[in-house]
Amino acid sequence: PGTMPITLRVNGETHRIAVDPRATVLDTLRETLHLTGTKKGCDHGQCGACTVHVNGERANSCLLFASMQQGKEITTIEGLGTPEKMHPMQASFVEHDGYQCGYCTSGQIMSATAMMHEKWGPNDNDVKEALSGNICRCGAYPNIVAAVQACRR
Ligand code: FES
């Protein structure tokens, strides 16, 4: 199949790239831009491992065509913070051991940071509900909830 030239804004940088018109944002991030912090779990919108921000709102990058995101601002876990200068939510996940294998972690953190601008209640159950689109197969949920709660206090 042929490719088409597109302009994609990712983490504040402009990328002029050629993509298959059917390429997802997830595959484009990982394979074209080599930003591998965003993970592929199900590739069907069901696990949340691929969560990024599009114009500040969370989105499953496996469900979006890269060719349709021109003019939008995409943020990935690499754009949120660095090991030297972590986002407070990243630091809180480290502090509270909010992971086991770590595969779902970038999606959890991208979801949690986007959620800070959404309306949701103060209880642990509200956190679980708000993060219910992000699956952790290790079952690290108690520590994930603790990390999010500590960050928003
Ligand atoms: Fe996108 Fe699972 S990889 S939701």
Image (cartoon, rainbow, N blue to C red):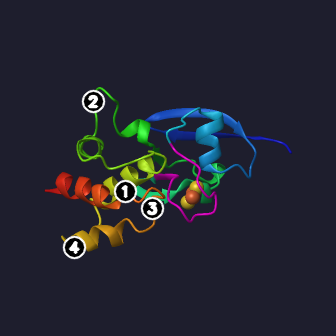
- Foreground: disc 2 or disc 1: 1
Which residue in the protein does label 2 denote? 85
Give the distance between the C-alpha atoms of the residues marked 4 and 3, in whole angstroms. Answer: 18 Å
Question: Residue drawn 28% across and 55% down?
Answer: 143
Q: Residue at x 37, y 48 (%)?
A: 99
Of labels 2 and 4, earlier in sequence is: 2
Q: Amino acid at mark 3?
A: Asn
Q: Which mark lies nearer to you, 4 or 3? A: 3
SS of the residue at dot 3? Answer: loop
Q: Quadrant of ligand 1?
A: bottom right
Residue at the disc numbered 4 = 121
Which three-letter amino acid code belongs to the residue tagged 1?
Answer: Ala
Q: Mark 4–mark 3 contact, CB under 8 Å?
A: no
Q: Nearer the viewer, residue 150 or 116?
A: 150
Q: Main secondary structure of the magenta part?
A: loop
Q: Earlier in the sequence, mark 2 or mark 1?
A: 2
How far apart marks 3 and 1 lie (CA) works out to 11 Å
Whichever of callouts 3 and 2 sits on the residue coming sooner in the sequence is 2
- Relative to residue 120, is residue 85 depicted above or below? above
Type of the residue with mark 2:
Lys
Mark 4 and mark 3 lie on one chain; the one further toward the N terminus is 4
Image spot of residue 81 (x, y percent): 33, 35
- Residue 64, position in %: x, y? 60, 57
Q: Mark 1 falls on what kind of element?
A: loop
Instruction: Choose the circle earlier in sequence order: 4 or 1.
Output: 4
> In the rendered view, does 43 fall on the left or right side of 100?
right
User: Is the residue marked by circle 3 packed among few (<14), some (14-19), or many (20+) residues within 10 Å?
Assistant: many
The residue carrying mark 3 is 134
Which stretch did the figure color magenta? 38-52
